[in-house]
Amino acid sequence: MTKKRFLTGFRKFNPMTKFSQRKVSRIFLVIGLVIAAGLVVTIAVVSIWPSVGAQGADFLRSILGTKPVAYLEELVFKVQDTVQQIEFRLGKTTPSAPWQIAAATGSPIPAPTLTLIPTLTLVPSGYGTPAATLQPGITATLTAVLPTLTPTITLLPSPTPWQPSLVRPMGAISGEGTWEPYIQDQSGTTVAYRTFLQPDSERPYVVIAAAAFDLSRVRLHYVLGTDEPYVPNAPKRFGAIPGRDLQPGLLLAAFNGGFKSINGQFGVMADAVVIIQPIEHMGTVAIYRDGSIRIGEWGVDLVYSNDMLTFRQNCPLMVHNGEINPLVYNDSVNDWGGTVNGDTVTFRSGIGISEDGRTLYYFAGQKITMPILAKSMQAAGAYQAMQLDINNYYVLFTSFQVENGQLAASPLLPKDMIGNISRFLYPYSRDFFYITASNPQP
């Protein structure tokens, strides 16, 4: 018997080998159970305490790196999505509006009115007639009869009131696509409307909220976070709304910025100081010294100019010149995720502007993909639109009411935006936008 055959036979009949195989199998089983338990705990933490989940993910990235944590996030999101789809099929999850819908139906936006404007029209009554018969030696005087002033009435339309574009419902939830008054300035004028869409036929329980602002009556501002966007050796940043704007009746709303700098190094400029150089062809929102706003593709629609005060980039445009960017269908981490890819269902947000430049949009929704978000942006009237931040906790839009003389935050999506909703009223580590009334006095 050769040595090779002897060793083979020994392994085959050796009871210790069988014991070792069983032991290894048990070890792998225990490891699998631990991973499964850890996944369940992770999902529970992310769902119940979004801020803890976000901080935990950042901590793991600092130890394991971005990619391993991205795979873990991807797994968590897929499990969450699968569970919710099962709950929907079992009737435990039903589609519903994200907030209480007013009893009245139809568009609350006032229709244009006609104003009676009197005008004066010159109607000649005839030519002059002689006052006396001409006779020799007598000088006759001709009296001209002046034209008669005849008043007429002309019906002219009053200036067209601002209103967001009409939205065609995509689902079956009552109130979907109807713009309802949302935010008023001190004069009582509605400067923002809100609505929601039900855009995903595969996930009917998913809704995307949209807020639309009248840019002729509000101004958009940008704040650098104390930590993000991060650049080495940066001077100290306060990460807070200036006191001059942190006033009841003046401060109307605030919402999240874009990705952390590690997830793309997208360009940033604040108060005319470039923090991170812009990247060609990236989606960019720019604020100018006169308060005007533009959203477009850097190097194509937007370039640096001396009157530009702020710009913030974040991924390619999602809607460009009214058309959905084909890149939203490519399921690319590099284009859309930073941590997750474009086909991942997660909490996403975005910003857009109408074709006439008068309406600013904000979008947000749970468990949505890039194509679904892009479709909703286009349907709501955004002519140019880009993605902002993603994932639980980081996506937040709050309006501000005055309670007992103090500002109080109220989230756009009350069931989903639940972590530290007052964060924009104090120094915050991440960058964000805020909106003030441009006509605060009645």
Image (tube, helix red, strand yellow):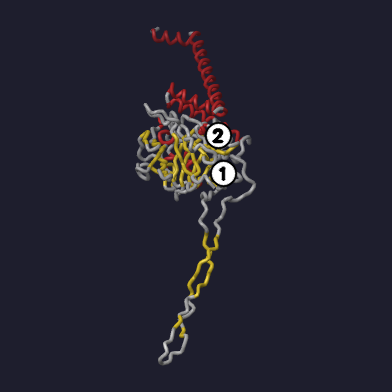
Identity of the residue drawn at 62% across and 49% down:
105
Residue 429 position within the rendered picture, expressed as x and y whole percent measured from the top left = 46, 29
User: Percent position (x, y) of residue 149?
Assistant: 50, 72
Q: CA distance from mark 1 to mark 2?
A: 17 Å
Mark closest to the chain's N terminus, 1 or 2: 1
In front of the other: 63 or 258: 258
Instruction: Give the percent coordinates (x, y) of residue 109.
Output: 56, 51
Give 111 or 138, whichever is nearer the viewer: 138
Q: Amino acid at mark 2?
A: Met
Q: Nearer the viewer, residue 87 or 335?
A: 335
Q: Quarter holding the N terminus?
A: top left
- The numbered dot on residue 266 is none
Circle 2 sits on which residue? Answer: 417
Q: Amino acid at mark 1?
A: Tyr
SS type, badge 1: strand
Other-residue count near label 2 (Cα within 10 Å), few / some / many at <14 / 14–19 / ≥20: many
How far from the left and from the top, in percent, is residue 98? Answer: 59, 39
Q: Tag 1: Cα neighbours inside 10 Å, few (<14), some, or many (≥20)?
A: some
From the image, tell me which residue sits under label 1: 182
Considering the numbered disc 2 on the image, is that residue within a helix, a strand or a loop?
loop
Identify whether 110 is placed above or below 425.
below
Where residue 408 sits, quadrant-wise, is top right
Compared with 31, 362 (above or below) is below
